[in-house]
Image: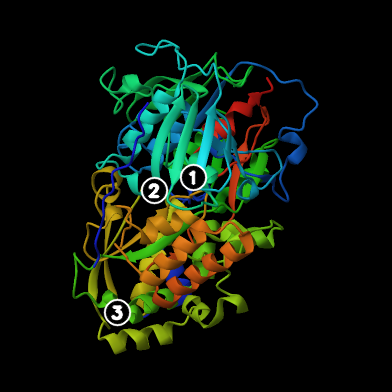
Amino acid sequence: MAARYPRRSSTTLGGRASRRALIRGAGVGAAGVVGAALLGCGADDAEPDQTTASATEGSSAGAASESGTASPIKMGGIYRGTRNGDPPTLDPYGNLSFETKSHGAYVHSRLYKIAARPDVNPNAVPPEPDVAEGAETEDGQTWVVRLKQGVKFHNVDPVNGRELTTEDVLFSWDRLVAPESPGATLVPHVTGVEAVDSYTLRFELDAPSASFLDLLSDTNVLLIMPTESDGGYDPLQRMIGTGPWILEEYEPSVRFRYSRHPEFYMEGQPYLDGVDLAIVPEYANRLAQFQAHNTHGFGVSGDDVLTLRDQHEGAQWFSLQPIGQSQVFFSPADMDPDAPWRDDRFRRAISMGLDRDALTDVAYNSNALRDAGFDVAGTWNNIVPAGFGDRWWLDPQSEAHGPTGANFSYNPDEARALLDAVGAGGLTFKYQYTDRYGAGWMKMAEATGNFMSEIGLNPETEVQDYSAVFITQTFRGNFHGVAFNPQTPFPEVGAFFSRYFGEDPANSGRISDPEISDLDMKQSRELDEDTRRQYIHDIQRRNAEMMWYVPNQYGAGTSFTAYQPEVRGIVQTRGYGGATESLVHTWLDV
């Protein structure tokens, strides 16, 4: 078979209130943040494929109730969960939406996946083979990937249960790197892919890579589709793959219904007969469904954890600080060439106007939970999420951050002085975000706008439709003003830099910083982890100096998920691949 090469594309850039009042004004009523934080850019209701890590302090069921039970595994049953909205389409190469990617993980396999394990922090585990048998490299630049033999597609027309081969992988790779693909810039360093035979692939990179297998495990990158999706069926409306779940029904605004793939390569798994996911936009309705035992798992708002724990006897509680990220960003130079946010002093003023501890509390109820004895996170996101921990994240509050750490500290007086120096005091501008990510997200988004007002700015809020405007326009840099967005929880840290500063069409600010580009190239090629970590820390310092993107706290708090007593085999993972990495291990003790 001939080698396949990605096509390249390029993008050029070019009255005050008290803090208590600011937070109080950031929305009232039930909050719904947890599932979104689990995903970063995700739904506010944690699905079974987004399960968390460890039983929380004060929970009504300990970690032993997770998967380490003495009960034998029971086959069958339907897991019932919820989603809070529809994907733009079902085609994994048609958009960058978390909804599309997370549903795609039910149906489409990857070459590698996250090695999800019980009682292990998902942010610390490496990738492992999915439909790949393994991979070898001698220099980190040429990689040979071998497929498992006998992997079967779903037994539905027009694929009819045939075997997966390298032709399907090459077809999917071509879709990934096509000029119209929004994910093409995720793999710019892969210069060629070829099939050695029906079960062996060779990847050529432009330099040694420390994270190639992590890249292959990312659900944002390569989800394997059959060649028949080119004309044999409409991938915008139908999904067929080799994954553990077969899509039986998708009724927009109503539900997804999946059945188990009986010839899945993990013999005997999944244990469940299927998964039903009702689409329920309102958090209060999802909470009521869980309380009535109509659903099996639920991402619980921090405001409701204590009440639900006391009222819902026997519920199992799990918590995790995810690798969620969010940021304030600014319209690109080609959209607003003379905007005051072209000046780094304006961007630094926005950052110093944010009380990050207060923002974490308003979305996650951190203070009350901490007072009740829960171990909750109090760290701040950098341009790398705090959930990555000491391996890659540089603590903005640490001495190691140096003088640029001051740009994270809440200092409204200095923020006003910087705005005055730019001549931007009293500036009116559009402040935009979407409501897709739940009530907790909305509270933080509103509070962020209030903090901007408190330093003398006049943001005019526009809450945008997710599919029609935000993910298709604002997220891709086609907007005027200032925006707020959660970011994809990439399982490999280097992907954040490609997204924020590379040629990715979702480089929302269309930022090109030569210093960061040089550091990004070095970290991506560095095989020594200590040296790579220093490059990654330097990227975080540089962004903090310029505040191209202003890191915010959505995704940095502790997320809580409750499960009904009968749910077993709860396994942690990260990113959007939990339908394969977690849900195949779940079973119901009924």
Left/right placement of residue 47 relative to residue 571 reads left
Q: Residue at x 38, y 36 (%)?
A: 100
Is mark 2 in CB contact (under 8 Å) with mark 1? Answer: yes
| Amino acid on which the number 3 mark rests in the picture | Asp
Disc 1 from disc 3: Cα separation: 34 Å
In depth, the one of 148 and 246 nearer the eye is: 148
Q: Mark 1 belongs to which amino acid?
A: Leu
Of labels 2 and 3, the one closer to you = 2
Label 2: how many residues lie within 10 Å, few (<14), some (14-19) or many (20+)? many
Question: Answer yes or no: do the residues labelled 2 and 3 have beta carbons within 8 Å?
Answer: no
Q: Mark 1, residues whose alpha carbon is within 10 Å: few (<14), some, or many (≥20)? A: many
Hey, which quadrant is residue 263 in on the image? top right
Q: Amino acid at mark 2?
A: Leu
The residue under label 3 is 343
**Is residue 334 placed above or below 254 in the rendered structure?**
below
Quadrant of res 531: bottom right
Residue 144, image x, y percentages: 52, 36
- Dot 3 lies on which element? loop
User: In the image shown, does 191 or 99 lie closer to the viewer?
Assistant: 191
Mark pair 2, 1: CA separation: 9 Å
Residue 480's place in the image compared with 281, above or below, is below
Quadrant where the C terminus sits is top right
x and y, in percent, of residue 141 in the image: 50, 47
Label 1 sits on residue: 215
Question: If you read the primary sequence from the N terminus, does the residue marked by circle 2 or circle 3 appear first?
Answer: 2
Question: Which of the labelled discs sits on residue 573, or is there none?
Answer: none
Q: Which residue is mark 2?
A: 186
In the image: residue 259, left or right of residue 508: right
Q: Where's residue 349, x and y in %?
A: 38, 79
The Cα–Cα distance between marks 2 and 3, rounded to whole angstroms, is 29 Å
Which badge, 1 or 3, comes first in the chain's sequence? Answer: 1
Instruction: Indicate left or right for 95 with 262 as reference.
Output: left
